[in-house]
Structure formats: C-alpha cells, structure tokens
Amino acid sequence: MANEFIHIDPGAILTKAEYELITGHQFNSQATGDILYASTSTQLSRLGIGSNTNVLEITGGVPAWVATSGTGSVARVSSPTFVTPALGTPSALVGTNISGTASSLTAGTVTTNANLTGHVTSSGNAAVLGSFTSAQLAGALTNETGSGLAVFGTSPTLVTPALGTPASGVMTNVSGTAASLTAGNVSTNANLTGVVTSTGNATAIADKALAIAKLADGTDGELITWNASGVIAAVAVGDADQVLTSNGAGAAPTFQAAGGGAWRLDGGNSTEGTTTSTSTADVITVGSLSIASPRAVNVRYAFRKTTGAANDVRVGLKMNSTEVRADSQSNLGTGNAAKEGVAFGEMYVNVSNYLGSSRWMTAGNHGGFVEAEMADMPTATITDVTGQGLVDDGAITLGMDELIVVSTSTS
C-alpha cells in the first residue's frame, strides 16, 4: 500500500539494534518534508510535502495542503500586518483606524459623528449630502460669522447684516433710514420721498440750481418775502391800483392804496415803429393796459423824420379805437433835413364831466412847440394807446419810439 508507515525489511531475524534504529521505520515513497498523520483510528499515513506558500488545511477530516494567494509571512488572527492585501468583499469590516486614500471607494451610509479629516471631495451624484438644517451646518463650522439661516446667491434675505465695503451694489429697492450714510453724487432724477434733511454743510445747494418750476404752487398775484423771524412767507394779493408798500423793519410789506400824487407806469414800448404813408397810419402801440378807474393820464413818445424831401411829418394819438388827437403839424419844419421831436398828451380818463379836459403838445429841434386840444376820452377801460402819423411826402420816413403811458389816481 502507498504512504503507510512501516518497518524496513530486517531480514529473517530482527536484532535489538535494528529494532531501536532511528531509520528502521519509514513511509512508502517517503521524501523530505513529508508529514505523519493518522489517516484512520488504527493507521498512520504520510502527507507529502506541499508547494511553497501552501498552508495546511483540514479537508474531509484529514489534513491537506492548499494553495494561497499573495506573498510574505503567514498571518495570525490577532494583529496581523498585511502588505497590499486584496480583501475582496468582506462580510464585515470596522475601519476605525484605516488611513490612506481609498481612491475607488463607494461609501454607503456614513454613521453619525463619523470623524472625517481633510477635504471631503466627491464625483458624480456622490455630492448629495442628505438633509442638514442651517443650525446643524453652523455647528459643523468653526470660523463663521453671524447667525441664523444659511443663504445662497440669488434673492437671499439678510437680517441686519454688516456688509463691510461692497465692491458694487444697486440700491434701487433699498428702503429704511441710512442714519450714518454719506452719499456721493446722487444721479439725475433720483426719486426722493418725504422731507430731505441734512446736517453740516450738506444743506448747501449750488447757486442757480433750482428752476422756478421746482417751487411749490401758490396763489396768483402773491409775492414771496421773509417775516421778522426770517421764515419765508407770502405777501397777499392786492387790489387793482394798489401799490406794494413797506411797513418798516420787522414787518412784511403789503399792498396798499397809492398816496395822492403817486404816479404809476401803466405800460411802454421801446421798439421803434416807422411809416412812409401819406395817410394816417398806426406807428407804435402799447397794449394790455387796464386803465378803468378815474385817473389822470400822461402819454408821450419821441418821433423823427428823415431826409428825402422838403416836407414835414404829422403826428397824433389813438386810445383803443378812438382817435383822440388827429394828425397835426409836428413842428419839425419843412426843410429836407433829419429832425427829432417829442409829443406829449395829458388827459383825464373816466372822470365824470371832464372827459374833454386834455391837452396835446409837440416840440422839435426846429424850434418852438405846437399846442392843441384833444377830443373827449373814451369812457371804456383803456387797453391800447397808439401813436399815429403820416408824412407829407412818401420820400420821407416817420419814426416813433419810447412810447410811455403813466397815470395817477384822482382825489
């Protein structure tokens, strides 16, 4: 039989020395490294030497050599040291003291309070971290500032943040009171609501920066003044023919009836008018007058003639559409020379029983003057006064300028 443990052949007689001989027993096919084991309860057998790195393993109740993977020393259960082992898929593994980089590790659920060091990186959808509250996230950080909820870049709601010095910012929807804000240049058409207040020299507004349209609306005819306290105030509207009268220091002026003998300027025209007409023509006019109450009125204008013919010019006066003085000799003379003169009329307007109390005079640098009567004054409100005239020869030009209308109240 193969592999049995047997005596060597001693011959016919077994001596004591042969019996005690160390080499007197052997296996069938014995070789170096073989192992003796009980193959049955009554039989000893040989287990042939295994290959390098084989390990002894029990198979079917008897020992057997089996092949292993890897190289190095045999490891034991307690605290073995493995060198680059391929662990396959362990049924259980506690990784408390594992270090290094698991470059291809796919982790399942990481237990609560897992102690991770270094940066946490991920690829694919491993970036999903699960559900965290803002408080839990704040608890995981050590150098954060502020408190409350975590925010993201789009439309966050911040509560009393200290923004430092932003590199830029659009303040379109900012509200509230910026108690310590120092503003630079406010853009054109900035929409400011409420009362604008300031401290220091911020009250200064550039000279001539406000247009009249920027002032608050008021009442037609009122004037602006400052009262005794230096506060801006309005001067109430006066009645027709009243004049603005000073009430002395510390009191605002008021409109009051003009004192006796006070003349007012009702209107004037300083643009020269001319004519070469040989029939009566309107030469210069003052319009938009309102002389209604009984008043003494004076009208005057300057006139001239040019060279062109040895003839004179004639001048007169019209009120509204009524000719109150027909064209009369100007007293500039008939010589062919440029001459100047003045026409003057004084009359009473709307004075009962004295509408014809008037006088017309002309004087020129030819010498002397001409005085003549005027027609009765119109009874309607005087709105227009016109200087009229003509030339005795169309080669002459008649000019009129500086038409002035003044009046005073009657007693």
Image (cartoon, rainbow, N blue to C red):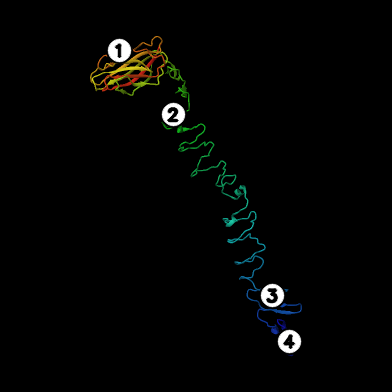
Q: Please tell me whether residue 107 is drawn above or below residue 169 in the rendered image.
A: below
Residue labelled with disc 4: 16
What kind of residue is marked 1?
A: Glu
Label 4 neighbourhood size at 10 Å, few (<14), some (14-19), many (20+)? few
**Mark 2 secondary-structure assignment:** helix
Q: Earlier in the sequence, mark 2 or mark 4?
A: 4
**Mark 4 secondary-structure assignment:** helix
Tag of residue 212? 2
Q: Earlier in the sequence, mark 4 or mark 1?
A: 4
Tell me if residue 228 can be seen: no
What kind of residue is marked 2?
A: Ile
| Label pair 4/1, CB-CB below 8 angstroms | no
Q: Nearer the viewer, mark 3 or mark 2?
A: 2
Q: Nearer the viewer, mark 4 or mark 1?
A: 1
Q: Residue at x 69, y 75 (%)?
A: 64
Distance, label 4 to label 1, CA atoms, is 197 Å
What kind of residue is marked 3?
A: Ala
Q: Nearer the viewer, mark 2 or mark 4?
A: 2
Q: Earlier in the sequence, mark 3 or mark 2?
A: 3
Residue labelled with disc 1: 371
Residue labelled with disc 3: 64
Residue 94 point in image, percent of width and height? 65, 60
Q: Please tell me whether residue 185 is drawn above or below residue 289 in the rendered image.
A: below
Residue 108 found in image quarter: bottom right
